[in-house]
Image: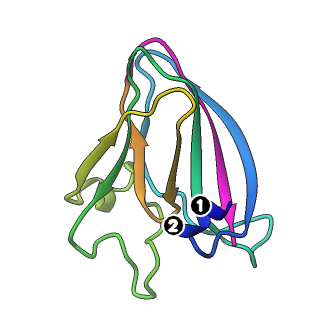
Amino acid sequence: MPDLRRIFPSARRSMDWLYVEYGPGQFVTPHVDYPHNEIAPDRPKVAAIGIVLHEAAAGGEFYVETGGGDALWNEAGGIKENANIHSPWFAGMRRTRWRVTCGTGDALCWGTQLVHGTEPVSAGRNGKFIGFLGS
C-alpha cells in the first residue's frame, strides 16, 4: 500500500478482488469503473489494480484512453452515467488509446475514473486478479 499511495494518496485499503480470464476473441470494451462503492458509500473506490497471473501468447493488452474534450464529465465534475461503449455519446467521443503489455507477475494500477479496457486475445489465455483500492 505505501507504494500505491504515492500515486493514489487517498487509497487507504484493499477492497474486493476477482479473478478474470480471457481467451481467443475475448476482450473488455472501453469503460469507466466509477468511484461509487455500493457496499460502503462513504468509502469510494479510488483506484483499481490488476495483477497478471498468466499472459496471453498474443493480444490481450491493457489500454487506457484519453481525450481533450469535456464530453466525459457532468456539470458536477464527475463522470457522466453510462460511460461505456454502449452509450452513443461515449462511443462518439474522440479518444487516444495507450496500450501496455503486462507480463506474468506484473501489477498495473489505474484510477476508477479513467477510461480503460483490453484488446482482443488472439492466442492463449490472459488471467489476472483485479481489485479495488478504497479511501
Where's residue 105, x and y in %? 57, 31
Residue at x 46% of width, y 19% of height: 56
Residue occupying the far bottom of the picture: 76
- The answer to if 134 sits in the magenta stretch is yes
- Closer-to-camera residue (41/2): 2
User: Rounded to the nearest whole Å, what is the CA distance between mark 2 and mark 1?
Assistant: 6 Å
Provide the residue span drawn in magenta. Answer: 121-135
Residue at x 28% of width, y 72% of height: 71
Where's residue 84, x and y in %? 42, 53
Residue at x 28% of width, y 47% of height: 98
State the SS at label 2.
Answer: helix
Residue occupying the far right of the picture: 39
Amino acid type, residue under disc 2 in the picture: Ile
- Main SS class of the magenta portion in the image: strand
State the SS at label 1.
Answer: helix
Q: Is 49 on the left-hand or right-hand side of 44?
A: left
- The answer to if 123 sits in the magenta stretch is yes
Where's residue 58, x and y in %? 36, 17
Disc 2 crowd, CA 10 A, few/some/many (<14, 14-19, 20+)? few
91 to 61, vertically: above or below: below
Tell me if label 2 and label 1 are in contact, CB under 8 Å: yes
Q: Quadrant of the C terminus?
A: bottom right
Q: Which residue is mark 1?
A: 4
Residue at x 66% of width, y 48% of height: 131
Residue 125 is marked as none
Q: Which residue is mark 2?
A: 7
70 to 32, vertically: above or below: below
Where's residue 44, x and y in %? 67, 72
Q: Quadrant of the N terminus?
A: bottom right
